[in-house]
Image (tube, rainbow, N blue to C red):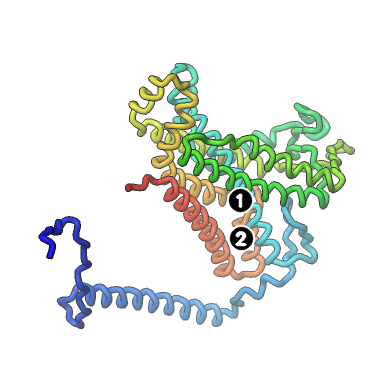
């Protein structure tokens, strides 16, 4: 028999045995279950009462309920839509779908542009150049102190003050600025472009896979293979090859002045321009402060150590500071994305037809206010939850993992 003694610190730790649930008020788990049942039951009872009371009152006043109206012809004129719409035959459901797409068009573009502008402003506030730092500080302080609705009205009034199409500004070939909006050239979309877009998506997947493979090789050997040549081939070469193999069609439709208005090309309406511009400028001022505080949260020793290695400031910021600052930036940045999306509901003040505007018109015509308000709430709830889930996933992905 061996005389070796086992170190108790190295012995496997056994989990404490679970105590059986006791149907006694002295058991904390039993009390928790009882209180949860009571709270959920109370909430369910309140909801049931409100639904029954509302249904009874609507029936007494002979007001229709339900969502059957979504299949009826809308007859709502909509100025801009991403899908085909004819008020004489399209339904309320299609009109609400267009409102949803218009809201997403503002939210997605606004989030991207506000992030870019806010990041640049946040970095500029920390610039060693006195003029750049002060100008960015003035921008942030002034914009944050002005109500967002006032800024939307300002930009809409400014765009409405542009000259008529006949006297429009012509800053670039094929681009015209007038009180009817911004006219730009547009490429006529054909079937090969869809295949090129599919090739680009495949290229993105291939680039991500190669980047991960390069990271694994770097961890194993200390040498990282170049990623940019492969990314260039996947993201540019492969789609261009597919597009060229299918005939390489490329026809540009240019806007042309005919009489008192333009024909051809694409139009960016003054309402959409004012809404997007106002929301981007307003939200970027808050994002700038978030980025600035995130960078300042990184210890100055990181800058000093990188400087001692001879690294340039731009490289230090891009590869060392910002990746660490993201852990501080992402949570409050999520709130700003949600605020921008919800602030897009102010579009009704300048005539942009988003989900709020079209749903309001729908409930006025049909008299079904509860369903209209419910549709608006559901849309913003789904969008907000989607943004939160995406940002929480990314925040968890970049979080520090203790070993």
Q: What residue is pinned by disc 1?
A: 348
Residue drawn at point x = 44 percent, y = 30 percent? 141
Residue drawn at point x = 48 percent, y = 38 percent? 221
- Viewer-proximal residue among 366 and 46: 46
Horizontal arrangement in the rendering, residue 42 relative to residue 371 (left or right) = left
Q: Secondary structure at mark 2?
A: helix
Residue 234 visible to the viewer: yes
Q: Is residue 212 above or below residue 161?
A: below
As drawn, the residue found furthest toward the top would be 130
Q: Position of residue 292 (x, y in %)?
A: 42, 32
Q: Secondary structure at mark 1?
A: helix
Q: Position of residue 97 (x, y in %)?
A: 66, 61
Residue 142 visible to the viewer: no
In three-dimensional space, the C-alpha distance between marks 1 and 2, rounded to whole angstroms, equals: 9 Å
Horizontal arrangement in the rendering, residue 339 relative to residue 190 (left or right) = left
Q: Position of residue 278 (x, y in %)?
A: 57, 39
Image quarter of the N terminus: bottom left
- Viewer-proximal residue among 35 and 24: 24
Q: What residue is pinned by disc 2?
A: 360
Q: Is residue 242 above or below residue 296?
A: below
Residue drawn at point x = 43 percent, y = 45 percent? 398
- Viewer-proximal residue among 181 and 110: 110
Q: Is residue 133 above or below residue 244?
A: above
- Mark 2, Cα crowd under 10 Å, few <14 / some 14-19 / many 20+, is some
Along the polypeptide, which appears first: circle 1 or circle 2? 1
Residue drawn at point x = 22 percent, y = 62 percent? 12
Q: Is residue 88 above or below residue 175?
A: below
As drawn, the residue found furthest toward the left would be 3
Do tag 1 and tag 2 residues touch (Cβ < 8 Å)? Answer: yes
Horizontal arrangement in the rendering, residue 296 relative to residue 156 (left or right) = left
As drawn, the residue found furthest toward the right would be 259
């Amino acid at each position: 028999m061996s005389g070796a003694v086992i170190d108790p610190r190295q012995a496997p730790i056994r989990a404490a045995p679970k105590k059986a649930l006791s149907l006694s008020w002295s058991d904390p788990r039993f009390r928790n279950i009882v209180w949860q049942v009571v709270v959920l039951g109370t909430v369910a009872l309140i909801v049931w009462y409100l639904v029954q009371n509302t249904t009874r009152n609507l029936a007494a006043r002979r007001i229709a309920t339900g969502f059957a109206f979504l299949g009826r012809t809308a007859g709502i004129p909509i100025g801009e839509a991403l899908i085909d719409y004819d008020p004489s035959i399209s339904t309320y459901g299609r009109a609400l779908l267009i409102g949803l797409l218009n809201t997403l068009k503002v939210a997605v573009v606004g989030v991207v542009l506000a992030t870019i502008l806010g990041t640049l402003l946040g970095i500029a506030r920390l610039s060693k150049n006195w003029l750049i730092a002060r100008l960015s500080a003035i921008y942030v302080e002034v914009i944050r102190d002005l109500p967002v609705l006032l800024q939307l009205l300002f930009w809409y009034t400014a765009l409405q003050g542009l000259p008529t199409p006949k006297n429009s500004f012509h800053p670039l070939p094929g681009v015209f600025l007038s009180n009817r909006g911004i006219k730009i050239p547009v490429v006529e979309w054909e079937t090969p472009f869809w295949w090129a877009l599919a090739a680009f998506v495949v290229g993105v997947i291939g680039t991500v896979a190669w980047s991960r493979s390069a990271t694994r090789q770097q961890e194993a050997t200390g040498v990282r293979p170049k990623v940019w040549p492969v990314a260039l081939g996947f993201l540019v070469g492969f789609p261009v090859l597919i597009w060229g193999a299918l005939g390489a069609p490329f026809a540009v439709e240019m806007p042309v002045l005919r009489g008192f208005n333009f024909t051809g090309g694409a139009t960016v309406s003054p309402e959409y321009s004012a809404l997007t511009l106002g929301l981007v400028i307003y939200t970027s001022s808050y994002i700038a402060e978030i980025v600035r505080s995130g960078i300042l949260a990184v210890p100055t020793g990181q800058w000093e150590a990188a400087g001692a290695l001879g690294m340039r400031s731009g490289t230090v910021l891009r590869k060392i500071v910002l990746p660490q600052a993201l852990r501080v930036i992402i949570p409050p940045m999520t709130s700003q994305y949600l605020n921008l999306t919800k602030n897009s509901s102010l579009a009704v003040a300048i005539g942009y037809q988003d989900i709020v505007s079209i749903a309001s018109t729908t409930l006025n015509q049909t008299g079904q206010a509860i369903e209209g308000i419910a549709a608006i709430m559901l849309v913003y709830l789904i969008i907000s939850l989607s943004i939160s889930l995406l940002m929480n996933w990314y925040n968890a992905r970049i979080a520090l993992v203790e070993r």
